[in-house]
Amino acid sequence: MQASHAGHLPDAPLLEMRSISKSFPGVQALHQVSLELRAGEVRALVGENGAGKSTLIKLLAGVYQPTEGQILLDGQPQLIRDPAHALRLGIVPVHQEVNLEPYLSIAENILIGRQPRNRFGLIDFGQMNREAARWLAELGVATDPALPLGMCSIAERQMVAIARAVSLDARVVIFDEPTSSLTLRETERLFSVIRRLQAKKIAVLYISHRMEEIFQICDTLTVLRDGALVATQTLDTVTTDSVIRMMIGRELQDLYQKQATAVGPPVLEVKQLTVQGILNDISLTLHRGEILGVAGLVGAGRTELARAIFGDLPYQKGELWVEGRQIRPTCPDDCIAAGIGLVPEDRKEQGLVLPMPVKNNISLAVLNKLSWLGVIRPRQETALAQDSVRRLAIKTPSIQQQVQYLSGGNQQRVVIARWLATHPKVLLVDEPTRGIDVGAKSEIYGLLNRLASQGVAILMISSELPEILAMSDRILVMYQGRIRAELPGPQATEESILRFATGQAA
Amino acid sequence: MHKTAQPLAQPPGGAGFDPHGALAELRHFLAANPAFIILAGLMGLGAFLSPVFLTPQNLLNILWTVSVLGIVAMGQTILLITGNFDMSVAYVVGLAGIVAVISQLWGAGFGLSLLLGLLAGALIGLLNGSLIVWTRANAFLITLGTSILVYSVNLILTQSKTWYASVDSFLLLGRGKLFDSLHYSVLLFFLLGVVLELMLRHTTFGRSLFVIGFNPRAATLAGLRVAPLKLATYVFCGTTAALAGLIMTARTGSTVANAGVGMDFDSLIAAVLGGTSLFGGRGGTLRTVVGVLILGVLNNLLVLLNVPYEAQQIAKGLVFLLVVWMDGFLQKR
């Protein structure tokens, strides 16, 4: 793990992060991470979902302040108080949407707050358009600055954001997945702009999942894993494979090994499911007793797939079949009636009614079965809740406890208990262990395994590759709204999944 | 402290009734429902300040006065629990009376005129609900808009004149008393308060309303059909407003286009004063009964003490602000 500098770069770093740590209540997001950026350097920042990239960017952009460590600019320690302060220091994050006003012109967006005035104190539009055109020309962009931004493509908006950054005397520009919605040609243009930034001695931090781009545009590479620095290297010393290995690193924990279960007949069949612009021609079959893992990067369409199957996202094309019967859901209730349940990715916002008791949260999907002429039978409801608490070992002082006071793992069990009460044939689980500590995680895995062995067909979406690998009988890898690969669980590796998930292999 | 706000969507009581537990439960209940303390305090103050206040005649008078607003506030409370509002109730109160009186002039009897009046309210509720479900726009503003429409319908129907009811049995609805002491309208108000409270606590429909109020997204994903439920609550609110309007018209024997003016905000104040949240998910109709009584007692006291009208309005404004502040404060705990 040598820290080597490319020869043509000046030696004093423009920006330096020294042993930065950042913790949130219960989570250590970054631990002792150091990073240097030199003028004219393009540094790639890579890592799996949750490795700490976003936290690092937010520290630089002044959204968060480090718990420990220092950020130095030109060798001077700086406490970056807020995003406005970061901008004044010349640290400019380029997101796609942030801070751009669709109803103003390109020129106004570039020069917002600094529009040239005429002698009446009004905006001098001619002058403003000329100035904006000059900034755009510096980037090699020839768009008419008088156009309203709302008419521009995402790529053009990105150029506007960069032009604004340059006009603000940016010294460090941070790109976070800048090419995720660009075409190949637009990507090429972005790269030529980045090279111009480089020529202007601006330092660039480039975050991307796409390996080929990183090798094309970056000089140096920083790898994060689980909030810690893994490697700082120049790109000529690494290969795609070695980078992916560094990103994964850890040994597979056999803490939660899938028990072999007999996989039965098909339960859920999805045929050519298409949601305009989000899901493209998705077909899959889910069998009784099977755990089908769905891997992919954020934005690959995994959650949307679950929502479409659950009747929560209207689809334009395709068919859904449950046990040989076609369903045409208009709302989740239709799917619940067909025997499908969904454990959503955000249990606090989408799964639970936090201020309500455990009991009410468990009974929610079966209220009709528990009631007579619309009146809830209290004994049956209580019995269901007590039975669920016992069977799923939910730790709560009573079934009357508000679910918001339970731990993450126990909250998740309450959501699962709600679906078990419906006796589901299919359970869609989206990020089942997000925000749950390690011990509770393996208990959730055990629970899912038990359900599968009882015959429930489980579709498990997860961003955590070890989890996908350990739990799945088969693995689907999604990329840009399509299923790119189907891998048999035992043969799959993190490398093979990541290669498909990043669009490396087709 | 924040744990004193116990789950509200659960039947009171529970296992065992030892006196200590009951006392603790009472303390608990009062801490979560300060409206009862406010009402008791106001009544004590009234008894102290005015010799007339505690006479049965005055108390019955208060009940009679507030019962119309109280019935409007019942529907409003149901909506508030789902996190919605209806600002059109004031003119629906007027509309129902107008429809009933005009249909009587055309020969309709007691039953038919009553039915038509209620139907008018239900239709406005359906309109409100449909607009909110379809446009997904802010419920407060949508119903403010329909409120103006309903008012103009009222103006057209009445031709801006006062109209007089002509069916005696209809007048009994507003003036009749049980055992010659308690007005039917007061009885109806209390009955609604109790029945709706039971509905909210013990039926799937009631439970669904609380869930929608707390977290509409989770409600949908748990299989609740939120749109039809919303429609139903708006239709219900329109119907209770119409019922209140019919009682009011029967009471005075006449009606005008703006008969219910002010009841939009008053019903909100009453509900929130009783302990129903403006943010959805928390509340109940029995609490609203208490809130309505607080407003009634306050008004009555101010009148008994000969406080000028302007000062009465100031008191009302202050109470409203206090209540809104309290609601926001309780939410943040």
Image: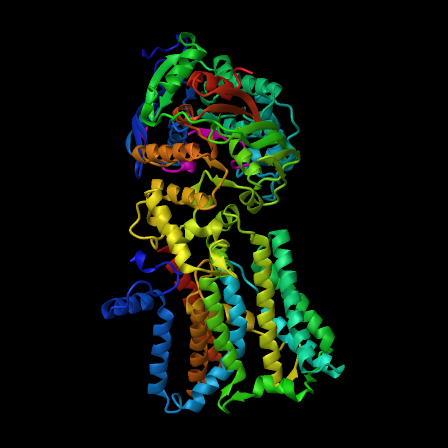
Q: Residue at x 45, y 63 (%)?
A: B202
* Foreground pick, A324 / A311: A324
Residue A375 location (% of width, % of height): 48, 62
Quarter of the picture containing the C terminus of chain A is top right
Which of these two is toward me, A156 or A328?
A: A328
Scheme of colours in the image: rainbow
Which of the two residues, B182 or B164, is positioned nearer the viewer here?
B182
- Residue A132 visible? The answer is no
Is residue A90 shown above or below A349? above
Give A378 or A136, whichever is nearer the viewer. A378
Q: Is residue A264 visible?
A: yes
- Residue B128 percent location from the top left of the image: 63, 61
Q: Give the image location of residue A50, x and y in percent.
A: 39, 29
Name the image quarter holding residue A261: top left
* A81 in magenta: yes
Q: Which residues are magenta?
A: A77-100
Locate the N terminus of chain A and report the quarter of the image it occupies.
Answer: top left
Image coords of residue A381 (percent x, y): 41, 55
Q: How many marks?
A: 0
Position above or below: A75 against A362: above
